[in-house]
Image: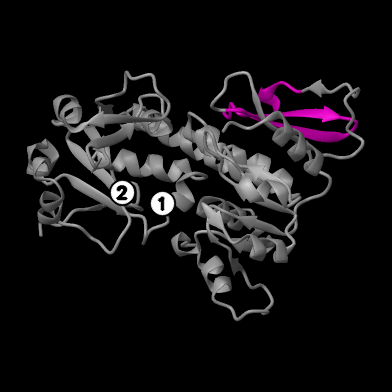
């Protein structure tokens, strides 16, 4: 079910200053003053307070959330590993009192605090699975807010009735890597560290632009195929997705670069083989013991042997259970651009690969 007017109003009431009345005139800033790349976040000024508005990424022209923060957040429950990493970057990870999907979090200090005995100072509580969180534990923590990534048709269920503000973290729906990373400026303001967030984003933006300019001076790079098939479907980035744009910024070639979708493309194996089977590089993510080898891939799907990259051995895996790919790349797309430049331009060395490693023959 889509977000209802009642839900939006309840979120507004929970997160807004009581003085923010319907008859108040809000002078809207141009989005460019607050966000250079992000398309889903805007900020307006109202009597000295900042009013944040999040656009609904699934319904053009609709608003997902709007609120004025009364005071910086000091106790939060975080449902996603990437936002745990961001709060670590911003120096406010000590304000995390609970997390969901703890088994997937690789941030060292978060893991250390999860392992502390009950009642210990700084202890982070495991609140269970993000799809069915432990409501009693969340309530007992008395958080100022819950940070959760929404999805189309999502219902907040019991969370909606707790009276705890819910921050709908729709940053992953931005269509550019820098657009998503720029949300750190928004989260920084929620935690009262806006200047720190602005400074970090300036570093990310300038480094990304420097790497992009460097890549444009290189000869056109190799072509790349991403991910593996899931069942009968092979999900690959759309041409206008953050990964599709990042491949372009790395001056590489991508079989679906002309596609106009900003999300993943659910394609058949036949479509992949026909259009992208001759890609020079095959790079995918795994989440398991790893590392894989070519024989394991063939046991998964014998048809992989038709890929050019399989025959040449240009196969690279990123084991997300061991390297902080999902934690970092949301906020440091410059890291991923550096990675992509090296994958697509094998003669270039920019310090070595951070996330991917070449697959072993056996």
Point 72% across, 46% down: residue: 190
119 relative to 131, above or below = below
Question: Dot 2: within a 10 Å radius of its alpha carbon, few (fewer than 14), some, or many (20 or more) residues?
Answer: some
Image quarter of residue 291: bottom left
Local SS, label 2: strand
In this figure, which residue is indicated by the disc labeled 1?
325
The location of residue 290, given as percent across then percent down, is 25, 61
Say how many tags the image has.
Answer: 2
Point 90% across, 29% down: residue: 21
In this figure, which residue is indicated by the disc labeled 2?
285
- What's drawn in magenta, residue-wise? 29-56
Distance, label 1 to label 2, CA atoms, is 9 Å
Front residue (pair 200, 285)? 285
Front residue (pair 127, 147)? 127
Image mark for residue 108 = none
Point 15% across, 29% down: residue: 270
Q: Is residue 44 left or right of residue 274?
A: right
Question: Dot 1: within a 10 Å radius of its alpha carbon, few (fewer than 14), some, or many (20 or more) residues?
Answer: many
Query: Does 34 lie within the magenta span?
Result: yes
Q: Is residue 99 left or right of residue 296?
A: right
107 relative to 33, above or below = below
The quadrant in which the N terminus is found is top right
Local SS, label 1: helix
300 relative to 124, above or below = above
Image quarter of residue 64: top right
Give yes or no for contact between labels 1 and 2 (Cβ–Cβ under 8 Å): yes
Point 31% across, 49% down: residue: 285
The location of residue 69, given as percent across then percent down, is 79, 42
Query: Does 290 lie within the magenta span?
Result: no
The quadrant in which the C terminus is found is bottom left
332 relative to 58, above or below = below
Front residue (pair 235, 247)? 235
């Amino acid at each position: 079910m889509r977000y209802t007017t009642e839900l939006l109003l309840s979120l507004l009431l929970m997160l807004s200053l009581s003085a923010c009345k319907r008859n108040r005139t809000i002078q809207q800033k141009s989005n460019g003053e607050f966000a250079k790349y992000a398309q889903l976040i805007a900020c307006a000024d109202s009597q000295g307070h900042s009013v944040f508005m999040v656009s609904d990424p699934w319904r053009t022209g609709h608003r997902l959330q709007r609120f004025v923060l009364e005071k910086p957040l000091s106790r939060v429950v975080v449902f996603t590993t990437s936002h745990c990493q961001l709060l670590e970057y911003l120096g406010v990870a000590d304000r995390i009192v609970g997390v969901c999907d703890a088994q997937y979090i690789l941030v060292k200090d978060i893991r250390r605090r999860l392992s502390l005995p009950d009642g210990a100072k700084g202890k982070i509580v495991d609140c269970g699975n993000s799809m069915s969180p432990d409501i009693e534990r969340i309530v007992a923590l008395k958080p100022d807010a819950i940070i959760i990534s929404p999805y189309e048709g999502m219902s907040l269920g019991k969370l909606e009735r707790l009276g705890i503000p819910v921050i709908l973290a729709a940053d992953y729906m931005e269509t550019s890597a820098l657009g998503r990373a720029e949300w750190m400026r928004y989260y920084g303001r929620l935690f009262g560290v806006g200047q720190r967030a602005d400074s970090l984003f300036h570093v990310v933006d300038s480094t990304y632009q420097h790497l992009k300019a460097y890549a444009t001076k290189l000869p056109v790079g190799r072509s790349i195929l991403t991910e593996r098939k899931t069942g009968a479907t092979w999900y690959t980035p759309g041409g206008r997705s953050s990964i599709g744009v990042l491949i372009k910024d790395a001056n590489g070639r991508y079989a679906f670069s002309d596609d106009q979708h900003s999300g993943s493309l659910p394609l058949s194996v036949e479509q992949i083989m026909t259009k992208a089977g001759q890609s020079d590089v095959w790079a995918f993510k795994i989440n398991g013991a790893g590392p894989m080898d070519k024989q394991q891939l063939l046991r998964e799907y014998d048809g992989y042997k038709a890929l050019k990259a399989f025959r040449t051995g240009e196969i690279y895996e990123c084991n997300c259970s061991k390297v902080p790919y999902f934690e970092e790349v949301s906020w440091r797309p410059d890291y991923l651009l550096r990675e992509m430049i090296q994958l697509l331009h094998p003669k270039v060395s920019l310090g070595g690969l951070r996330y991917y490693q070449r697959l072993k023959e056996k």
